[in-house]
Amino acid sequence: MAERHFDKQILLTTDGLRALEEELEYLKSVKRKDIADKIKVALSFGDLSENSEYDEAKNEQAQVESRIVEIEATLKNVKIIDEDEITTEVVRVGAKVKVFDADFDEEEVYQIVGSTEANPDKGCISDESPVGRALIGAAVGDTVEVETPGGVIHFKVLEISK
């Protein structure tokens, strides 16, 4: 298996680091054993040439091993976002920002995180995303323009918190 090397630092919150470490532990201790058991059962069926259970288990094993390598590589390049360094004067990675979306006439709260931790469904947006890039460096009262596939949207920064 080819090892991937990441040159850039991966920014994570302490929660993001904890989640990655927990996922890695789960994959190594629980998931590996489950897959080994599936392979053992599939092997007991005999002929491997037409054994779909064996093929599925081997594919799942490859996916899990790939994810383990990916997480381990990420953890080697992690920089934890120090909450004490997060200021509320301007938007930075790690900050939570409440914005008013003028185009949809609604307030949204986002936490700006590193790309590894991004989860838009939970309001965690990457500092590399169009919205994240536009908000970085903005202060309360600033209005930022964001170029999206659907057109330009405008956010007014209402509040910055940790």
Image (cartoon, rainbow, N blue to C red):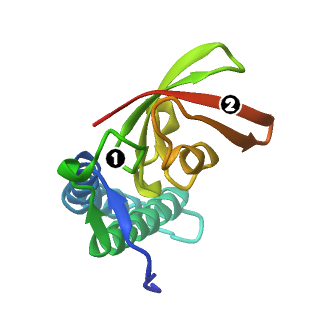
Evaluate if marks 1 and 2 touch, with contact meaning CB atoms under 8 Å apart.
no
Marks 1, 2: nearer the viewer:
2
The type of residue carrying mark 1 is Gly
Q: Residue at left 57%, top 27%?
A: 156
Q: In this view, does 124 lie to the left or right of 76?
A: right
Relative to 131, does residue 69 appear above or below in the rendering?
A: below
The type of residue carrying mark 2 is His
Q: Name the residue under label 2.
A: 154
Q: Name the residue under label 1.
A: 94
The residue lying furthest to the bottom in this view is 2
Q: Residue at left 39%, top 63%?
A: 64
Q: Residue at left 43%, top 76%?
A: 8
Say the numbered circle drawn on residue 146: none
Q: In which quarter of the image is residue 68?
A: bottom left
Q: Residue at left 45%, top 32%?
A: 140
Q: Where residue 38 sits: x, y (%)? A: 35, 56
Element assignment for label 1: loop
- The alpha-carbon separation of the residues under discs 1 and 2 comes to 21 Å
Relative to 78, does residue 20 appear above or below in the rendering?
A: above
